[in-house]
Amino acid sequence: ERGDRSLELAALVARATLRSTFTAVHDPAQGRALSEQALALARELSDRRAEAKIRWNMLLLSTATGHWQEATEHGEQSLALARELGLREQLAYTLNDIFRPYASGGQYARARAVADEARPIWAELGNLPMLADNYSRTARILFALGEYDRALETSQRAREISQSIGNLWGQSFCRMFVGYIHLERGDPGTAIQIMEDCIRLGEQAGFMMVQVGTRADLSWIYGSLGALERGFELCRLARSLAEQRFPALRAAALGNLARLHVMQGNLAEAEAAVAEGYRDPGLEDYATHAPLAVRLADAELALARGDHAHVIAVIEDLLARLKQVGLRPFRADALYLKGCALLAQNHTDAARETLRQAQAEAEALGSRRMLWRVSAALAEVELRRADRAEAKRLRRQAREVVGFIAEHISAPDLRESFLALADVRAVLHSH
């Protein structure tokens, strides 16, 4: 009889594993029911090895539905059992997947630690797809921490492994955050090519995270270069895919959509998208750009409306969150918006201090993307302070960076749309 129950348990675990790894988003209730049934039977039979795997399944289910605390609890129980029982492969799988709730909660140090622990196990087991996946996850954390060179090196290692075994998923995943680094450094042409390759490979592999998240990020990049029509096309598709297939990434798509509406001057539509983004459960998922995109959109909308007090309130909240989780990219964006709001309020000294902080952040990360904007704003500050020589130097710096970026936009029509932007023209024609 016990043998029959053990076979029943094995079948339940197999079904729960398939449900949790492949169809969790579509029918999480059924996956949860299977896992709970399997867990009850494992406890009845005192099968702790099975319980370790079931807890891992429940980690995956909770992650897919955005229940980060629940995912963490299941994952840590799976880890404890795997360590106690010496289950090396199970330990590696659980370490790999608890990474997501840690990263989503902004616990980057813990996410990095579990990735580091899992990596030698995958190498020892000779599991190259999972080793490549591990390198890509690590690259994501390195990007968040502003360690761009190491992120590129780690991503390249994932790419080499994935290409050697023909793994399309891995080839997509390794590109996921690399494009942003090239964008930061003032090379939009390379950034766009990498992100488009990432999406194309992700479509072939069925990798929804890049089909939604990377596409939404790319939509904002096109918009920031003046190609709004292309940006809206990509973002609306990203939002549609999120609603149909990957609800956890809906907030990121809404935030980028709102930013595009602000660029277009359609403030009512931007307000609606921002409000929807704030209501979305994915707003606080720090494994995505949702916490940034929605709040930056909110601040940009307020700046466009002249509601400078709201800009400052939103940005101070965002900066506190970024400091808490240790996220380095986009601090310069936040400080720039706050500086612009202070300047509009004629708080010249406070604006100067804030914009200098933005300048320091941009220079520390090598962010030409933000440096030209910050330099142009600082030039306006120095003009108000009657320091014409410093204003002239800052404007020259802004022009040089704009020229560098324009040279690194390979598509002629995209380069033309970038150079036609009002703030770009203002920099190029300043003296």
Image (cartoon, rainbow, N blue to C red):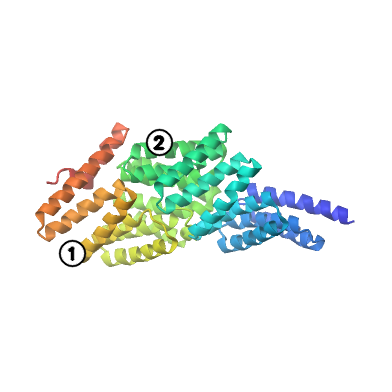
From the viewer's perspective, tell me whether residue 87 is left or right of residue 338: right
Q: Residues within 10 Å of mark 1 (few under 14, many from 20)?
A: many
Query: Quadrant of residue 425 in the image?
Result: top left
The kind of residue on which mark 1 rests is Thr
Query: Quadrant of residue 192 in the image?
Result: top left
Q: What residue sits 49% from the left and 41% below the top?
A: 174
From the viewer's perspective, tell me whether residue 363 is left or right of residue 389: right
Residue 410 is marked as none
Q: Position of residue 318 (x, y in %)?
A: 38, 62
Which callout, 1 or 2, points at the residue further toward the start of the chain? 2
The kind of residue on which mark 2 rests is Gln
Q: What residue sits 31% from the left and 57% below the top?
A: 300
As measured in the structure, the alpha-carbon distance from the residue carrying label 1 to the one carrying label 2 is: 40 Å
Camera-nearest residue between 56 and 416: 56
Residue 193 is marked as 2
**Residue 305, can we see it?**
no
Residue 348 is marked as 1
**Residue 325, can we see it?**
yes
Q: Position of residue 222 (x, y in %)?
A: 35, 42
From the viewer's perspective, tell me whether residue 48 is left or right of residue 423: right
Q: Quadrant of the N terminus?
A: bottom right
Helix, strand or loop at disc 1?
helix
Looking at the image, is 81 positioned above or below residue 418? below
Q: What residue sits 70% from the left and 59% below the top?
A: 84
Looking at the image, is 42 positioned above or below residue 10? below
Helix, strand or loop at disc 2?
helix
Q: Position of residue 218 (x, y in %)?
A: 40, 43
